[in-house]
Amino acid sequence: MSELRNRNLGPLPALIFSSRWLQLPLYLGLIIAQGVYVVQFLRELWHLLETTILHGGLSEAAAAAGQTAETAIMLTVLGLIDVVMISNLLVMVIVGGYETFVSRLRLEGHPDQPEWLSHVNAAVLKVKLATAIIGISSIHLLATFIKAEKLDEKTMLWQTLLHLTFVVSAVAIAWVDRIMTPPSKVAREHH
């Protein structure tokens, strides 16, 4: 690594290599987006507490939609889980993407270093993102099935097909990654 730093790059290679820093504003923007998700989570949590504890029951909007208190609470909690899963996805993209494509974070030995970060690369990041998207899609599909009586079959069918497409895509990405990774490297990663 120090040899690379000491070696003088020509102007064009230096420009090309330095262009990775153009991604920095993108990652900073994702951090701001994560802040927006925190605000959204807190709003939804407050709404849940307000309707169940402070007002002792169902909100007017839920009652007007014909939902039971249990269904309204379940849908709100699923919405909270959805926000958390999207936030986790953002963390994976921000931390993993920055580490993979921009610069090392130098977290080795830090007690809070994510376990997955030590072996992250573009392929691992793609598989992790695909599985996170499946999790998010599963939450949306569960919410759809909870409100099934209010939705038409065509909507539920398309959401199910979209979810299955995500699952098949994730399996395909993982399979291609497995094919492209030499067997000796796979054995080392699992030990």
Image (spheres, helix red, strand yellow):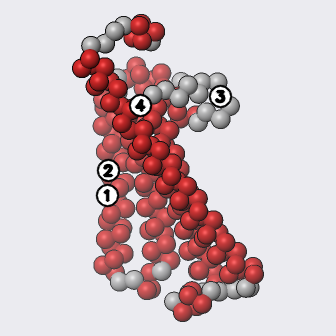
Tag in front: 1 or 4:
4
Which badge, 1 or 4, is on the more N-terminal residue? Answer: 4
Task: Residue under label 4, please give it.
Answer: 102
Query: Do the residues bearing badges 1 and 2 touch, measured as CB atoms within 8 Å?
Result: yes
Mark pair 3, 4: CA separation: 20 Å
Kind of residue at badge 4: Val
Q: Residue 29 at what x, y percent from top left? A: 45, 49
Instruction: Tell me the element at label 2.
Output: helix
Q: Nearer the viewer, residue 139 or 157?
A: 139
How many residues crowd around disc 3 within 10 Å: few (fewer than 14), some, or many (20 or more)?
Answer: few
Query: Do the residues bearing badges 2 and 3 touch, measured as CB atoms within 8 Å?
Result: no
Seen at 38% across and 41% down, the residue is 126
Kind of residue at badge 2: Ser
Q: Which mark is residue 169?
A: 2
Instruction: Tell me the element at label 4.
Output: helix
The image quadrant of residue 21 is top left
Kind of residue at badge 1: Thr
Task: Residue under label 1, please give it.
Answer: 165
